[in-house]
């Protein structure tokens, strides 16, 4: 058995940090959505997350996520796919998830689109590798505009925003330029006024750097260990 994590208490601390970061940047705390990253915890912890009033649930492995979904019947749960996705598994994400945070190639867009009903589009974040790290997936910033323009061919995909993962550092201030660069890129794309890509949202910031990400405009933050701990599922 894994020790029980006090999700509600953790969430209270996180909400306080969100409020502080929003005050610094002149934003309402309600503009930030917390995605609970539950990839390393089991169904009981997901139930505690939902009981705490967090309804956005993030998973990065298709098969494991589907198993958890079958055991979680809460009707307010909103499932986010936050990992790299193989095109051959796109059908599962298209049918089961509301959001995908890792759209980064046209082949994947095509695979998702053909499994969807355009009257109920999949909400997509385009993944951008702002830092240029070789270990991270995503488009380079200069590739994003053309990529998003090409996504107009896939009517079942709605491009709601951009996502990035910053390098892991001890001092979160060091990655502020990464978050700022994504926000500025988002602003450029918004100015194009593309009907298929409103691109209002920014998915950026994790447990170690979410306060800085919020100060730079994050609207979705992905929190794992600071919220739900780590049960190291195998």
Image: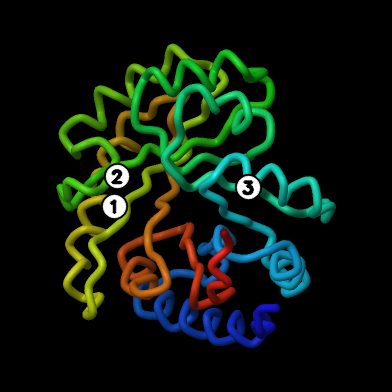
Q: For residue 169, which quarter of the picture?
A: bottom left
Residue beneath the point at 56% across and 51% down: 59
Nearest the camera: 46 or 80?
Answer: 46
Of badges 2 and 3, nearer the viewer stands 3
Residue beneath the point at 43% across and 75% down: 22
Name the side, left or right, on which 234 lies relative to 25.
right
Which residue, given by chain and number where applicable, does mark 3 sit on? 64
Badge 3 marks a residue whose secondary structure is helix
How far apart in space, not on screen, are marks 3 and 1 (Cα)? 32 Å
User: Is residue 142 at least partly visible in the picture?
Assistant: yes
User: Is residue 35 at least partly visible in the picture?
Assistant: no
The C terminus lies in quadrant: bottom right
Name the side, left or right, on which 60 lies relative to 118.
left
Of badges 1 and 2, nearer the viewer stands 1
Q: For residue 72, which quarter of the picture?
A: bottom right
Residue 41 spot, x, y in % from top left:
62, 66
Which residue, given by chain and number where applicable, does mark 1 sit on? 183
Which residue, given by chain and number where applicable, does mark 2 sit on? 187
Tags 1 and 2 touching, CB below 8 Å: yes
Badge 2 marks a residue whose secondary structure is helix
Residue beneath the point at 34% across and 66% down: 213
Residue beneath the point at 49% across and 67% down: 223
Residue 81 spot, x, y in % from top left:
54, 44
């Amino acid at each position: 058995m894994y020790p029980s994590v006090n999700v509600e208490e953790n969430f209270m601390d996180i909400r306080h940090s969100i409020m502080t970061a929003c005050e610094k940047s002149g934003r309402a705390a309600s503009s930030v959505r917390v995605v609970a990253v539950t990839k390393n915890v089991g169904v009981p912890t997901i139930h505690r997350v939902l009981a705490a009033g967090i309804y956005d649930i993030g998973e990065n492995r298709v098969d494991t996520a589907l198993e958890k979904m079958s055991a979680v019947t809460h009707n307010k749960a909103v499932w986010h796919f936050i990992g790299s996705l193989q095109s051959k598994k796109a059908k599962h994400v298209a049918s089961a998830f509301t959001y995908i945070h890792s759209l980064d190639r046209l082949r994947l867009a095509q695979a998702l689109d053909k499994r969807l009903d355009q009257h109920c589009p999949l909400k997509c974040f385009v993944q951008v590798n702002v830092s240029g790290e070789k270990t991270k997936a995503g488009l380079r910033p200069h590739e994003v505009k053309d990529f998003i323009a090409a996504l107009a061919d896939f009517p079942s995909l709605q491009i709601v925003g951009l996502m990035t993962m910053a390098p892991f550092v001890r001092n979160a201030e060091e990655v502020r330029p990464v978050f700022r660069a994504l926000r500025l890129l988002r602003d450029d794309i918004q100015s194009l006024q593309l009907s298929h890509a409103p691109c209002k949202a920014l998915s950026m910031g994790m447990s170690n750097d979410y306060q800085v990400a919020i100060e730079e405009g994050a609207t979705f933050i992905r929190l794992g260990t600071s919220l739900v701990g780590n049960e190291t599922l195998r």
